Image (cartoon, rainbow, N blue to C red):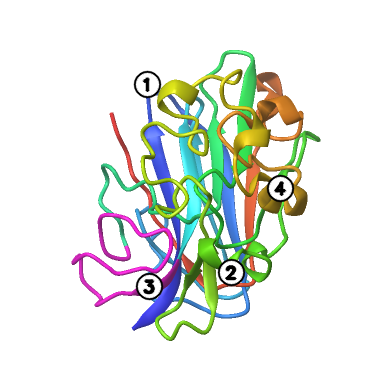
Amino acid sequence: MLSTSLSLTLLALASVVSADRTFTVKNNALFTSAGTAPSHATGWEAKKGTKVAFKVAEDWNGRIWARTGCKFDGSTLPSTCVTGGCNGGLECARVGGTGVPPATLGEWNLASPDQDWYDVSAVDGTNVPMSIANDAGCAQPSCMKDINEVCPTELSVYDSTHSTVLGCLTSCQSRALTPVPSNSANCCSGAFDTPATCPKENVQYYEVFKSNCPDAYAYAYDESSGSALWTCPKAKKANYTLTFCMYPLSSHFDERR
């Protein structure tokens, strides 16, 4: 069946510690998605208005994103998704499932001794509006604009009927704009792999993402904007809520040790 899905990836777990932070993922979408809803698996159904809460370790480092336009066959066979796909079915494989662009990302690094670091990122393009909240009074970044509505044609990713835009690529991911992504100002790679050699002015379509989602990363070195990377004092032990809007969702959890 066709659906969209949400994905959660644990990128690193440096040590075995108590799981004492709570993450809640909410779907305020207009539709529902396919699959099952285990409490702590690499993929679950996220029906309209539902939420899933789970514990993470104090040094958790990971990301959460949505997959859209997916087709799942109800097994562990690979799924096909228009945006955000990973190396698995509804429940993605536990290693390497980082989301095929375009995909709006929620990212966290709780491993620092003093601060939680977190952000909403459009570096891999965008597909689903999202917001990050917490119970510690810290910054609450979001990308609530549906960038699909304003995405330039050459960056747009369409559904199978080519009638609906499901995602917006960045200039780095467009082979028409960036034929050599390993050495490109659009990708901040190769000879352009430092903040000094990769200013935002040289990144095509930077403003499409930054003007519509000013609190999110719009390219790799967007920290200089002052509204891309956010922190929360470690001592506050913040619990985080990620809310997706406007689309059907389900999920993924990938662990690397």
- For the residues bearing labels 1 and 3, Cβ distance under 8 angstroms: no
N-terminal of the pair, mark 1 or mark 4, is 1
In this view, the residue farthest toward the top is 113
Q: Classify mark 3: helix, strand or loop.
A: strand
Point 44% across, 66% down: residue = 5
| Amino acid beneath label 2 | Thr
N-terminal of the pair, mark 1 or mark 3, is 1
On the image, the x and y values in percent for residue 146 come to 68, 65
Within 10 angstroms of label 2, few (less than 14), some, or many (20 or more) residues? few
Within 10 angstroms of label 1, few (less than 14), some, or many (20 or more) residues? few
Residue 238 visible? The answer is: no
| Amino acid beneath label 1 | Ala
> Which of label 3 and label 2 is nearer to you?
3
Asked if residue 46 is among those painted magenta in the image, a careful observer would answer no
| Amino acid beneath label 4 | Glu
Kindly identify which residue carries mark 3.
70
* Left-right relation of 238 to 250: right
Kindly identify which residue carries mark 2.
50
Kindly identify which residue carries mark 1.
14
Within 10 angstroms of label 3, few (less than 14), some, or many (20 or more) residues? many
Q: Nearer the viewer, residue 210 or 129?
A: 210
- Image height of 24 relative to 236, above or below: below
Point 25% across, 51% down: residue = 93
Numbered range of the magenta stretch: 68-90
* Left-right relation of 206 to 124: right
Q: Kindly report the distance in space between the C-alpha atoms of the residues bearing marks 4 and 3.
A: 29 Å
